[in-house]
Amino acid sequence: METITFDLDQHTLREVNQYLHSDAAELNGKTVTVANPNGSHNIAVGLKSDVNVTIQGHAGYYAAGMNQLANVVIEGSAGTGVAENMMSGRVHVKGFASNAAGATANGGLLVIDGDAGLRCGISMKGVNIVVGGSVGSFSAFMAQAGNLVILGDAGEALGDSLYEARIFVRGSIQSLGADCEEKPMDAESRQILVNLLAESGHQDADPDSFTLLGSARKLYNFHVDNAGDY
Amino acid sequence: MSDAPKIPQTEPRYSATFDKNTAAEIRRAAATGIYDIRGAGAKRKLPHFDDLLFLGASISRYPLEGYREKCGTDVILGNRFAKKPIHLKTPVTIAGMSFGALSGPAKEALGRGASAVGTSTTTGDGGMTPEERGQSSILVYQYLPSRYGMNPDDLRKADAIEVVIGQGAKPGGGGMLLGQKISDRVAKMRCLPKGVDQRSACRHPDWTGPDDLEIKIAEIREITDWEKPIYVKVGATRPYFDVALAVKAGADVVVLDGMQGGTAATQEVFIEHVGIPILAAIRPAVQALQDLGMHRKVQLIVSGGIRNGADVAKALALGADAVAIGTAALIALGDNDPHLEAEYNKLGTTAGAYDDWHEGKDPAGITTQDPELMKRVDPVKAGRRLANYLSVLTMEAQVIARACGKSHLHNLEPEDLVALTLEASAMAKVPLAGTNWIPGVTQF
Ligand SMILES: Cc1cc2nc3c(=O)[nH]c(=O)nc-3n(C[C@H](O)[C@H](O)[C@H](O)COP(=O)(O)O)c2cc1C
């Protein structure tokens, strides 16, 4: 497999991203390594082909933003909005992720080995997110669809104003947000969890140690008696 | 006795404070327990472009000949950073209006009308539809807090991208598309169950202050390989600072929307009480651009209550590069048309006042997702009406510009204007008619 290396000490971000936007014929199956990322923002954003990208260090904001098809590995930690609005593909953060990881993402898999900050999975629209550590407050706020798996603990107001996304938590939960409630673990949800644990390298985690959360659907249509929850 | 003197009665007198509308709203609130939600913009009388007048040419300035001498109307948007700036034949653009709020045929008609006269149209909350991309030769793609329907393929299909921070009708507010309007198609595009109220967030999910905005704009530029102009849209509140921050964050174009600007559905209290009129917002916005040496380099598009060519000319004279229209475009398509009076009556309203657009029962088929009602919009005919109207706006603005001796609409300037009222004079910073006085600027 051919590997191409861009060193951000030598190349501009523009050169890296421009190359990563080349035709699928040029990129498919290739591995592109980004050396010395040093927290640069917007690395490997807008990818749209089946390419492997390894970021050898820490990435700034929006790493792998709006990803389609590509497989991006961040060997360090990621800043705000990693894999935001991802459509497909896979993004793996080996360190920690800052706020709004996987925000509004529609598809694909985001794996975070460490902890994630505030608002992880905010407004998610179909993505799968697996966090090896804990997530900060307001995670899965207004989450519409997809699955958020948290192996550690969750902060305050988890799943506030949740729509149809599923949240699986293994550790403790500081508090649930409005309209988020515990649900019995049905067979379909359990299978989703088992698959996601396997795909994210957590096949040893016991699926039965997780709590499933979903929407109570009380805020789906406005009623004055629920006004205080909005 | 019968010949006792009759005591004069006082006439029944309504309170100016508790007028009929106010009292009716109190009763409605008491009966339902929910605030009033409606479409359209602020309805009360506000300081506006009508409070300004052009001086026209005279002995000291000579006019241009109406039918022979050229008066240019074209405008280039986004030549600060974008490799492919936008060229419009007229400075009147179609504002962002969401699919979901508007029907598919209405969106198509907007595209047809705008394309016919060489101007742009804009998507809205809910994403891009094939109807509008197909029929719009120049399409601006809105990037909104909800990110409903947002996807990178559409981002790349757009001709420009508009990062929406706020709207004049509801600066600081999100959106609410009530369940009635969530058809299968709208639900699918927004990735939500059918029939559920859709709350659009008021803040972007993955950034907060102006420093983050700069990184966000850089991200969109990287994704689109620096080809497309990036607009930033703000509701008019603190225009000087917002425009300065948008420029600093790297915007190519700033869109400034005043409180008269329409909305698909917002609380009445929000529409009428938050934000400032566009008349008061243009000068501070232009000042910010001038202070940064960016006037005409970062273009300014203004909106909120633009109705005719005089409004267009006044907005440009105050320093804007272009304007956007929402409500007026819908009226041109057929919204609130008197020929539907009987149907408006059935809904408890009257043509010209219908604003319950969120209920999805629009007899004109424009602000609805009802498959039967939306058939009433013939996209070709409605598009033609919009094109006609846009041409009139452009020609009217030219009439005024020529009368002021200007060979391009952009040569109009504040010196061409005076104000009819003290408020307008202070807000637009042009002298009160017949005086040299600008309150807050010059001594009386
Ligand atoms: C039906 C309707 C839907 C709208 N939807 C959006 C929207 O999705 N995003 C947005 O930024 N503005 C939206 N607006 C506001 C317009 O973009 C624009 O700011 C406003 O209509 C301009 O004022 P005017 O209506 O007085 O011309 C909407 C307006 C209307 C009337």
Image (cartoon, coloured by chain):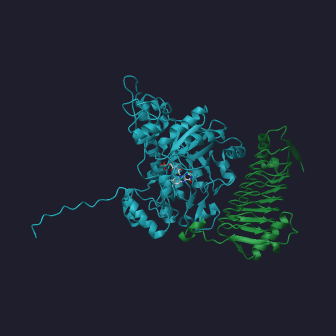
Number of numbered tags placed on the structure image? 0
Nearer to the camera, B155 or B3: B3
Residue at the (65%, 72%) spot, across then down:
A216
Provide residue B151's location: percent of width, then percent of height: 68, 54
Nearer to the camera, A181 or B70: A181
Asked whether, in this view, residue B124 is left or right of residue A105, the answer is: left
Provide residue A179's location: percent of width, then percent of height: 65, 69
State the hue of chain A: green
Residue A127 can be seen in this image: yes
Quarter location, residue B388? top left
Residue B296 can be seen in this image: no
Q: Residue furthest top?
A: B60
Nearer to the camera, B75 or A178: A178
In this rendering, the answer to whether B144 lies above or below A181 is above
Asked whether, in this view, residue B160 is left or right of residue B53, the answer is: right
Provide residue B243's location: percent of width, then percent of height: 59, 40
Q: Which quadrant is home to the C terminus of chain B?
A: top left
Provide residue B262's location: percent of width, then percent of height: 49, 52
Residue at the (78%, 50%) spot, across then down:
A24
Q: Which quadrant is home to the N terminus of chain B?
A: bottom left
The letter of the cyan chain is B
Q: Residue furthest right?
A: A1
Quarter location, residue A186? bottom right
